[in-house]
Amino acid sequence: MRDAVRLHYPESVRLLEQAVNISSGTLNVAGVRKVGDLFAAELKGLGFETEWVSFPDSVRGAGHLRAVHRGTLRPRLLLIGHLDTVFEGEAQRWVQEDTIARGAGTSDMKGGDVSMILALRALADAGRLKDMHVIVIMTGDEEAPAQPLSITRAALLDAARESDLALAFEGGTESHAAIGRRGSSGWSLTVTGRQGHSSGIFSAGSGYGAAYEGVRILDEFRRAMAGEQGLTFNVGVLASGTTVVPRPENGGMLADGKSNIIPPVLQATGDLRFLTDAQKEAARARMRAIVARPLAGAQGTITFEDRYPAMPITPVGQRLLAILDATSRSLGYSSVTTTAPESRGAGDISFVAPLIPGIDGLGVAGAGAHSPREQAFLPSIRLSAERAAVFMSRLVEQWEARQADPGSR
């Protein structure tokens, strides 16, 4: 398998270059689909049945690539990647300097998709893929999941129900993988107050206005909850004035106002990240309580939107990590330990965590993800694919077909 990875490595770099040069921001439906077609052709060549899972017209988003290799061996594996990027455009095209490649998706996560395909090719060349049951889901909207999740994550959840273990190829390093990830929730705050002349601010007739009340709420969030392990709550967009108009097409807001007018409205949006659902619910309760104690002349409302569930560390996840660690060392690479759940963002593997055990961070090493400076260390494609191929082979040899006891998870 190692020899096969090294044999196909040059063509895998060319495949990554092709993928990166296809602009595929989350809302670029045509671009996401084109990247999916590129990878589908590779998987078809390995004996996978491929299909494009489209969304209804009412849902914004490209859909997902689903590929199935049918076999009798257990465990049945679910491999997870994604096709979309945060940034796109001519300025984000492929640039290679020796072993460093720059461009949108080089590490997050077209590089991971390529290393996944290279690992499957190595399994096929070694005769190991023939009887394995593998489902590949590459989502088209991981960077900004389309709503409702009941529709846009249905294919992923259905695949999990047909599988025993999930392996996700988000970015990783030689020495770290992830068996826990925080969940993510969105929140929206709207504050209203009495519009009036600025000379009346703080008076009994005018009150404090929407801006001061909104700032009070946000600062009390910080005072009440900052520093709790695993919990963060970021303010992403904030606007106040005589009018505030949300711009759902890009997540922004348009505000109008004057310095001599007490603003009657403030709106803010952000995210809430957590280690467990219990921590999420406790944080939401505290945030609601803070909003419910307004300054004079103002009032606020806060709403929450579920996005990614939490993926807590479990004994089954630790066993997966132990097999990956032994695999890495047998290949002459470093030991592998887990990253702290709070050190990573949310990922698609979190959606399947309540159904099956999994491990993430099997992709390529890089830097600058979610920025115009994104880059990948190309030799890590080889490392990732070698390790993933042998890891999957060993799972077939070492993992019991029976499901783990629910209590152990």
Image (tube, grey):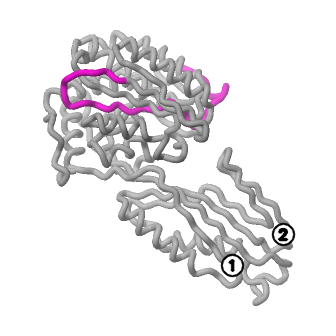
Could you tell me if residue 67 is visible in this image? Answer: yes
- Check disc 2 and report the residue beneath it: 259
Q: Horizontal placement of 242 versus 69: left or right?
A: right
N-terminal of the two: label 2 or label 1?
2
Q: Give the magenta range.
A: 68-97
Q: Quadrant of the N terminus?
A: top left
The span from disc 2 to disc 1 (Cα, nearest Å) is 19 Å
Is 340 placed above or below 8 here?
Answer: below
Residue 69 highlighted magenta (yes or no)? yes
Q: Residue at x 39, y 45 (%)?
A: 351
Asked if 125 appears above or below 254 in the picture, the reply is above
Amino acid type assigned to the residue bearing label 1 in the image:
Ala
**Nearer the camera: disc 2 or disc 1:** 1
Q: Residues within 10 Å of mark 2 (few under 14, many from 20)?
A: few
x and y percentages locating residue 21 in the rendered image: 58, 21
Q: Residue 298: horizontal and vertical position, in percent?
A: 69, 79
The amino acid marked with disc number 2 is Ser
Image position of 215 (left or right of 51)? right
Image quadrant of residue 356?
Answer: top left
Left or right? Give the position of 84 relative to 297.
left
Q: Which residue is mark 1?
A: 298
Quarter of the figure with residue 336: top left
At x 77%, y 88%, the residue is: 203
Depth check, front residue: 121 or 98:
121
